[in-house]
Amino acid sequence: MFEGLGYFFAAVLSFLDPGSIWNILWATLLGIVVGMLPGLTATLGVALLTTLTFGLPSGEAILILVCMYVGAIYGGSRSAILLNIPGTPANAATALDGFPLARRGEAGRAMGIATAGSVLGTFVGMILLATIAPLLAEAALRFQSYEFFWLAIFGVVISGRLTALDDPLKGWVAGFLGLLVAMVGQESIYSFPRFAYGSTDLAGGFGLLPVLVGLFGFAEVLTVMKQPLIAAVRLSTDSVIPKIREVLAYWRTILRSGVTGTLMGLIPGVGEDMGAWVSYALARGASKTKDEYGKGSVEGLMSAEAGNNAAVPGALIPVLTLAVPGSAPAAVLLAALFIHGIRPGPLIMIEAPSFVYEVTAMVFFATLAILLYGLLLTRPLLMVLRIPPSRLMPIILVLCTVGSFAIASRLFDVWIMLGFGVLGFVLRTYGFPMAPLILGVVLGPILDSNLRRGLVLSDGSLLPFLTRPISIALWGTILLTFLLGVPAVQRFLARILGRGRGSAGEGGNA
Amino acid sequence: MNRTELVVALVLTAFGAVVVAESLRMPRFENIGGSFATAPGLVPGLLGAVLVLFGVVMAIRAVVAGGPPEAPGRPILLEEEVEGPAEPQEPPSAGRTRMMWMLGLSLLYAGVLVGRIDFALATFLFVFAGIVVFELPAFRSARAVTNRTAIAGVIALAVAWAVPFVFERIFLVNLP
């Protein structure tokens, strides 16, 4: 453990040169701006920046991306509080209590609380990242093909369940569609071009970044254009600097939200938005001032922002140790790691043990940057919110086009971006969530190669898939997730549990 | 009987069936020692079958239960329908028109122009056209028209210059 601390401090020191500090400052600021603007999400921001930093040395590039990620999740709180429009989906819970506070004339106080919550939440997540990642990597060393196969399915299933709470079936469909999308192109054993129909472009498969930029960029632009274009910002006159006593009074909430957020980020495909919602729900359940929630509760606001920011380091844990993304922006970061020649996965603690701590140090500096900007630059930054979507959306589309082209320099990638943008827009209209889809695209190759490799290793037998201990845990959880998603089963359970609770007051029967 | 859901479900089922059919057509490479387990069509076929299953369940649900369970006021996580501050009312078709324009212009720009004509020129045309189209409702007086068109032109020029500069000169990334 102390070895880890040593690596962490070494990493922190290594980032104290002017070049890195400059990168931290501009990347985090850009992230905050991206987070603030509707139509731009953290995922798109990280994706576009990945293409931009393609040519930079890996350490610098990853630092920039992490700062953009942290900044974007924080930045969304500005528009959520002032406009009741979350800048990114992760900030939807922030709007619930932030906007009422703003309407009461306490927008500055709300923004200060959001800053404090975000900073402290990220710190909690950061500590968990540094402690859990090495442990998880060690456990993951026992993973073989069979376990990775089940992990891929687990990721898609749990993501589908949790990101489409009211209709898990659609979440699962999205996830399996994503897995299928990853099947296009040359497969790993015979290099047979699947679903290519003679086209060399299709034989190369769908690159992750163009697909991402399409689903989270173009589709988002179309969605924003469909909605009424927003009105001007409501400026506040009160101070944006949080009172320390107020923040410290809620230390339990912050800790609880930080841990919850990190755990939500840790679960594959379930990211910052669930980090916010689950933290919010738990804080409300444990709160002595429940009724204030939704009407301007400082505690609620803090739990939402701590939760969503803690999910950022949380999402990085599976990225580093399992090469499985914990959230959509983390999926982009995963792609970026591969692009820069870094191999995340269980072997990371053996091949490059200091890397996990370097990433922790990056998160640390990004958090300091958002504290700085939150305290000093809030008012100037609000000018950004005055940019009308009519001017911004075309610019975003230009960036999407350039971004999709930049990695492989093929126009086909731009068409992929367009196609998936339309597909994503259509799917969203019919209630399908995007996160499981993108997770499926990332996990598809893992699923495919590990299933076939596992079957070859076991001589065609399904036995090891079903009987190895970790595999049992994984498919058991998958089965449970499916069952619990079926409404009939939910009602059945509610009836049993209700009866067990007795008849006083509740009744209990469905 | 929820017709939209049913159509979506049927499309999904048909799609899954096509995937399964195509996967079965893929070679098995038995002549070079392949087996069922290593067949390229294995995983796509299984995935297609799962999609067919989901599609059928969704279709049955649409017919029998009238679609997915009603959302109990819980927010839809990735598609915010949050009410904003009071805005001027607009007819519901306005949003759809804007979206179609954006779609059309984007497809024209990224699908046709980019790669065929100079990137900076294409970008200028697209950004200019885009801003003008979306600000049309605000063109109420002759002065507003000139002002806004001029601003659109300036922004378009700035973007057409800045994007290639930043991407190609500063970050050394290829542009179409």
Image (tube, helix red, strand yellow):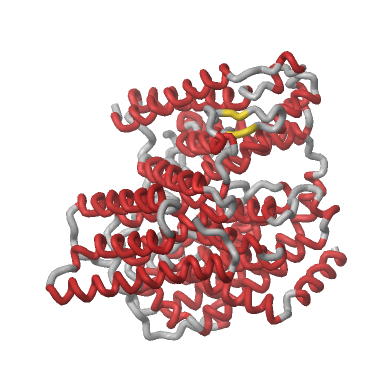
Nearer the observer, B111 or A450? B111
The image quadrant where one finds the C terminus of chain A is top left
Residue B45 falls left or right of residue A6: left
Residue A449, above or below A399 = above
**Closer to the camera in the image, B105 or A420:** B105
Q: Position of residue A340 (x, y in %)?
A: 70, 56
Q: Nearer the viewer, residue A373 or A92?
A: A373
For the N terminus of chain A, the image quarter is: bottom right
- Residue A501 as seen in the image, left or right of residue A323: left
Percent coordinates x, y for residue A446 in the rendering: 67, 37
* Residue at (65, 37) in percent of width and height: A445
Left or right: A10 as drawn, with respect to A323:
right
Q: Is residue A311 above or below residue A145?
A: below
Residue at image coords 66%, 46%: A324
A300 or A102, which is in the foreground? A102
Picture mark count:
0
**Rendered location of residue A66, percent (x, y):** 63, 64
Among the 4 quarters of the image, the one containing residue B159: bottom left
Q: Residue at x 52, y 53 (%)?
A: A405
